[in-house]
Amino acid sequence: MSSISNEIRDYLEPHIHEMTNQQRSLVEYASKCRLPGLAIALIDMFSSPNSYTEMSFEDRMEKCLNGQLDAMAKSKFARMYRSSGLPRKVYISSIKPRPEAGVTPDLLRKLTELNYLETGANIIFMGPNGVGKSTLAIATAVQAITRGYSVMYCSMNEFCMILESMSSADYVKFLQKMKSAKLCILDDWGMANLSDSIILRLAEIAEARYGTCSTIFTTQLQRHALGNIAKKESLALSSLKDRLFRPSDIYVTLSGSSLRGTAGEIRGERQ
């Protein structure tokens, strides 16, 4: 059974002596066809036949095919998560409401439902260091990936370095990539003043994504100061602010003491 993938072989090993040669061959065929979910469902049925005696043939087939669909969904999520650049995985379901700090049940519901992606609205998480801005942004992105939306994550500093180092030809290709990312996260917006060339490229990216894609910002700036990212005003900066920070966007102000280094965070309980 050399053609069986390592994943299937590890799952099969404890059950291999409970199955006939023909059953093992069927598992091998499923693995060879790159149907790991089907192969695992077959192993479950063949190794515990008494559990399935009352199921019709059609019900057993449905179970096997559902197993394959689940495996495909997990594989797609893993692939999209890797390509997103997200620094860690956080689920919205693991975040507890903290209304006193700005994390309300209504906010978590909005982030879960993802309706903002259909309208191209942006989300701006504002607040001091350590209050959970990035964690909320990442959890929102993971939720989007779960629903099949493409995500791109960058720290603002990294994003600017990428834009600064690109040739014109590379930038054109990057602009197309940005147009295809349904959700983009820019972490730590407004940490430093940006050059005119960066402002111009950001304005072009904002124009390309306007109305069809969403961007999440985390920032320590207050709402009235979100456009204070350059030493002087310019047409490009005015255009950028007009497309990124609109009255219809979602503004969330977080407060409270820093969550970094708390016992919950050390245990991995992201707030």
Image (tube, rainbow, N blue to C red):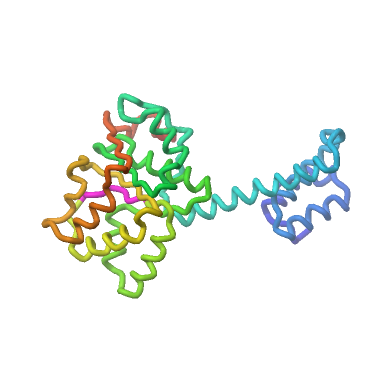
Which residue is at a point 20% across and 40% down the rendered structure image? 222
Which residue is at a point 42% across and 33% down the rendered structure image? 108
* 190 part of magenta stretch: yes
Q: Is residue 118 above or below residue 105?
A: below
Q: Quadrant of the N terminus?
A: bottom right
Q: Nearer the viewer, residue 69 or 5?
A: 69
What percent of the width, then of the height, locates residue 266? 40, 34
Q: Is residue 62 above or below residue 199?
A: above
What stretch of residues is rendered in magenta? 185-191
What percent of the width, then of the height, locates residue 74? 59, 48
Q: Is residue 131 above or below residue 28?
A: above
Main secondary structure of the magenta stretch: strand
Whether residue 79 sits left or right of residue 41 in the image: it is left
- Res. 153 visible in picture: no
So how many labels did they put on this image? 0
* Residue at far left of view: 232
Whether residue 77 sits left or right of residue 104 in the image: it is right
Q: Nearer the viewer, residue 251 or 271?
A: 251
Q: Nearer the viewer, residue 165 or 228?
A: 228
- Res. 263 visible in picture: yes
Q: Quadrant of the C terminus?
A: top left
Which residue is at a point 76% across and 55% down the rendered structure image? 30
Q: Quadrant of residue 159?
A: bottom left
* 74 part of magenta stretch: no
Q: Nearer the viewer, residue 177 or 53?
A: 177
What percent of the width, then of the height, locates residue 168? 30, 74
* Residue at far top of view: 100
What percent of the width, then of the height, locates residue 200? 23, 64
